[in-house]
Image (cartoon, rainbow, N blue to C red):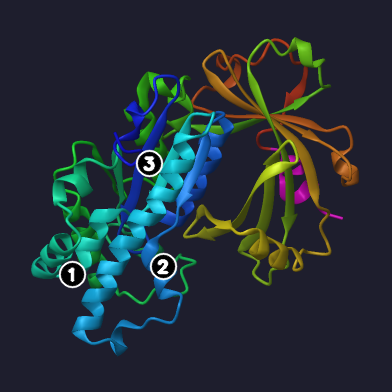
Amino acid sequence: MSAEKRSVVATTHRVVYKVVLTGGPCAGKTTALARFRTFFENLGWKVYCVPEAATILLSGGVKFSNLSQEQCDVFQENVLLTILQLERTYTDLASRDSKNCLVVCDRGTMDASAFCSEKVWSDILGNNSLDVFTLRDGRYDQIVHLETAAKGAEKFYQLTNNASRSEGLELARKLDTQAAQAWVGHPYCDVIDNSSDFEGKMCRAIEAVCKRLGKRLGVDVDDRLKALSKKRKFHVKNLPPTEVFSCHYQDFDVQHDYLSNNSRDSQLRVRKRGQKGSSFTYTLTERRICDGETIELLKHLSSTEYATLLKQRDPDHYSIHKTRRCFHWSGHYFQLDIFKEPFSPRCNELILLETYTTKCGTDLELPSFLDFNSEVTNDENYSMFNLSKK
């Protein structure tokens, strides 16, 4: 069986799970990609994100308004061929990885069919000896469709970091419908609508994949992903010896930097995250308040983009350096942040434990091998923004 076929059966010893993340304009796809990576990496998985082929090609100076119909048709064919090659590259890597792997595709093969006529699509398939069943049903384990904000969350439609976005609300709805219809027939297709706030939407997207994975995920994350789940934060007295951690854990080296920003209603920060001095990932986070709702938008960065943005770090804030230890305990997923040098005076010997849960008060069972000073969930002094202030 080809490595590009449904990959959960590619090995009996570990999991390689291939997901398409699709949807209409301004659906939260960029943020969801970043959330998927962080969430599953914290569980010890390797996450490969296949970039969107059309975006890569369009960034080379292509403007549809300047193309003839023949050029448009040829372009769509090359989008499909580029998708196939990009996916092959990342799937081959995943099939040879020693870890469980999640391969997240920023749109997939059938998305190409949503932007051309049936005849053109049929000709493309015929020219390349391809068929719909193989492209739709045989390549991916799951399809996750994020519904455009233009359907039910119109007030957030302009909250996007996609510089090339030009679609109005009606066109956005049409494109969303076309993208959804392109995947009709796949056996495992989940639609994530706008019935909750944005944070809830992101959690439901992750939850959809976790449910499909089931026991293959290896851990129980149900409580963390529930709609009413909230972050709780605790001040830990000291770090116990490593041997005290009876549970499996993953350590990550993390650096946060806040960027200069003229807006009082938003915060910008970049994050560098890696393990054992290598395998770094980079993320830009924009935290906004819109109509009373706090929204965090995330975007993956290349190392070059990260280095460029880092030059804009806010001189009124220290860099935050910490070891983030991720582990499961008594059915909950915890993150232990151990702040380290160089640090701001506020972070000296500081250790914080975080988790997302629906449980309140003492209903939440905390790790027995840790000693706590107090809960600091609602204490603004322990927010990262305030901890980093000079």
- Judge by depth and name the residue closer to the eye, 227 or 256: 256
- In the image, residue 254 sits, relative to residue 52, either above or below, namely above
The amino acid sitting under disc 2 is Thr
Residue 157 in sight? no
The amino acid sitting under disc 1 is Cys
Q: Residue at x 33, y 42 (%)?
A: 4
Asked if residue 253 is among those painted magenta in the image, a careful observer would answer no
Of the numbered discs 3 and 1, the one sitting upstream in the chain is 1
Splitting the image into 4 quarters, where does residue 62 fall?
A: bottom left
Asked if residue 383 is among those painted magenta in the image, a careful observer would answer yes
Q: Which residue is mark 3?
A: 205
SS for callout 3: helix
In the displayed structure image, the side of residue 142 where residue 122 appears, left or right: left
Q: Which residue is mark 1?
A: 116
Of the numbered discs 2 and 3, the one sitting upstream in the chain is 2
- In the image, residue 354 sits, relative to residue 195, either above or below, namely above
Residue 135: x and y in percent read 22, 49
The amino acid sitting under disc 3 is Ala
Residue 318: x and y in percent read 83, 54
Q: Residue at x 73, y 58 (%)?
A: 258
- In the image, residue 344 sits, relative to residue 24, either above or below, namely above
Counting every numbered tag in the picture gives 3
Residue 376: x and y in percent read 71, 32
Of the numbered discs 2 and 1, the one sitting upstream in the chain is 2
Q: Which residue is mark 2?
A: 55
Q: Estimate the spatial distance between the alpha carbons at disc 2 and disc 1, rounded to whole Å.
A: 16 Å
Q: Estimate the spatial distance between the alpha carbons at disc 2 and disc 3, rounded to whole Å.
A: 22 Å
- Judge by depth and name the residue closer to the eye, 206 or 272: 272
